[in-house]
Image: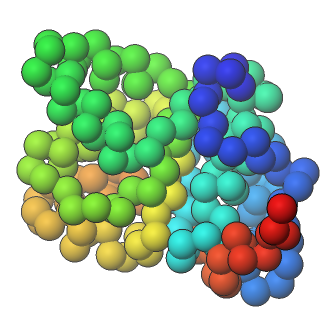
Amino acid sequence: LLKTAKLKVAACVEDIDWRSGRGLDRHLVTALAGGDWVRHARNVLITGATGCGKTWLGCALAQQAARQGFSVLYTRATRLLQELQVAHGDGSFSRRLAQLARLDVLMLDDLAIAPIGAQERQDLLELLDDRVGSRSTLITSQLPTSAWHAWLAEPTIADAIMDRLLHGSHTIALKGESMRKQQPQA
């Protein structure tokens, strides 16, 4: 399960940096590590500035889910949306959506890092609609969730996407400077 998850970083919940000022709620993260968010098909939305540890924390939670026997897949949001555009052209779109709908946890890293087009918005809605209430989605983004509606740009589809993402989700807003600045130089 860990191999097929294709996680970007080898992170685990046991190694979380709990320093004050990061905005991490130990009680929430510990509860998420228990896996009930996956069992109850809840989403986890992690936001914060560049380098504050969103991807690392997301991968740690995804790895924990895989260790508990859940199927997981990591992907960058822009790459997945590009992949779905290609799938429209080669006729594999429905099959790919069905594959993604079966995953217990889909981690979309760096959502809203680039502008989104009309077809990408529609594909994102289809993807999330297949998962809502039955599977969990873990999203990281530099933008706070309050700015996602504006990023999506088209009000009707933005409302539908936000409704599927926000209700019953766990939100973690990380704070602080880039964690990369604190890494020792090799």
Q: Residue at x 81, y 68 (%)?
A: 185
* Tally of numbered discs: 0
Q: In this view, does 81 lie to the left or right of 19?
A: left
Question: Residue 149 location in percent, x, y?
Answer: 25, 69
Hey, which quadrant is residue 79 in on the image? top left
Residue 22 location (% of width, % of height): 73, 79
Question: Residue 62, can we see it?
Answer: yes
Kindly identify the residue that appears in the image at 31 percent across and 19 percent down. 96
Looking at the figure, which quarter contains the C terminus? bottom right
Q: Is residue 186 above or below residue 136?
A: below
Q: Extreme front residue here?
A: 186
Q: Is residue 123 left or right of residue 26?
A: left
169 in relation to 3, above or below: below
Residue 107: percent from the left, percent from the top?
A: 52, 42
Nearest to the observer: residue 42 or residue 178: 178
Residue lying at 51% horizontally and 58% vertically, measured from the top left: 140
Left or right of 117? Residue 17 is right
Q: Is residue 127 left or right of residue 140?
A: left
Q: Is residue 96 above or below residue 46?
A: above
Q: Which of 12 and 65 is in front in this view?
A: 12
Compared with 122, 58 (above or below) is: below
Image quarter of residue 152: bottom left
Quarter of the image where one finds residue 2: top right
Residue 171 seen by the camera: no
